[in-house]
Image (tube, rainbow, N blue to C red):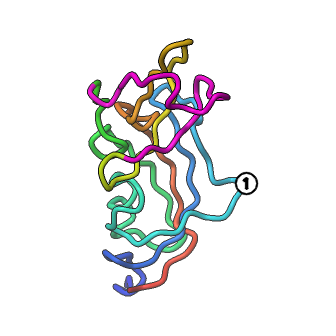
Amino acid sequence: MNNPIDTIHPNDRVQIRYTTRSLEGSVIETSDRREALEFHAGNESVIPGVSQAVIGMRLGESRTVTAPPERAFGRHNPDLIQSTPRSSVPLDTHVGDQLSTTFGNSRFDVWVQRVTSTEAIVDANHPLAGETLVIDLTIVGHDPA
């Protein structure tokens, strides 16, 4: 008989090993060469597709999760792509660079899409926004809340 304390519940601290792939099968990210990812189940510190998927799992269990954009990094929002004067970004800025900016009291990461002599086009969407992700995950640690 399974012990309910072995089952992961919301707010339990979990550690996972994972590999994230595109729908086509290309590896996007893996935890193979670093520490396990640690978070509280059901919380917002990781994408909902992972945070919710671990609830009900047990230590040592593996699962493959398909996370559509709504349960991953959200839909791509064209309104988050903006032009800014070239003078407002560092001189050594290149396409693909990640910059931080402040708008009101909030801090945002933006990715540089284009740089010309007069402007820089920056995108505040996460680079994986709009993507459906396939995540292979294994529970490697579990501490009940």
Name which residue lies at 55% across and 75% down.
141
In which quadrant of the rendered image does the N terminus lie?
Answer: bottom left
Question: Was residue 83 drawn as part of the magenta stretch in this picture?
Answer: yes
**Mark 1: which secondary structure?**
loop
**Where in the figure is residue 32, as x and y percent of width and height?**
68, 53
The residue positioned 51% from the left and 74% from the top of the image is: 59
Give percent across and percent down for residue 110.
46, 37
Residue 36 position in % (x across, y down):
61, 64
Q: Quadrant of the C terminus?
A: bottom left
Residue furthest toward the top? 117
State left or right for residue 141 relative to residue 129. right
Q: Is residue 69 left or right of residue 118?
A: left
Q: Is residue 87 above or below residue 126?
A: above
Q: How many marks?
A: 1
Furthest toward the front, the residue is: 87
Left or right placement of residue 128 versus residue 97 in this view: left
The answer to whether residue 109 is above or below residue 1 is: above
Q: Amino acid at mark 1?
A: Arg
Which of the two residues, 98 or 88, is positioned nearer the viewer here?
88
Q: Residue at x 35, y 26 (%)?
A: 81
Magenta residues (range) = 79-102
Q: Residue at x 62, y 25 (%)?
A: 94
Q: Count residues near mark 1 (Cα–Cα under 10 Å), then give few for <14, some for 14-19, many for 20+.
A: few
Q: Nearer the viewer, residue 92 or 62?
A: 92
Residue lying furthest right in this view? 33
Residue at the disc numbered 1: 33
Tell me where residue 66 sits by quadrant: top left
- Foreground residue among 90 and 82: 90
The residue lying toward the viewer, choosing from 12 and 1, is: 12
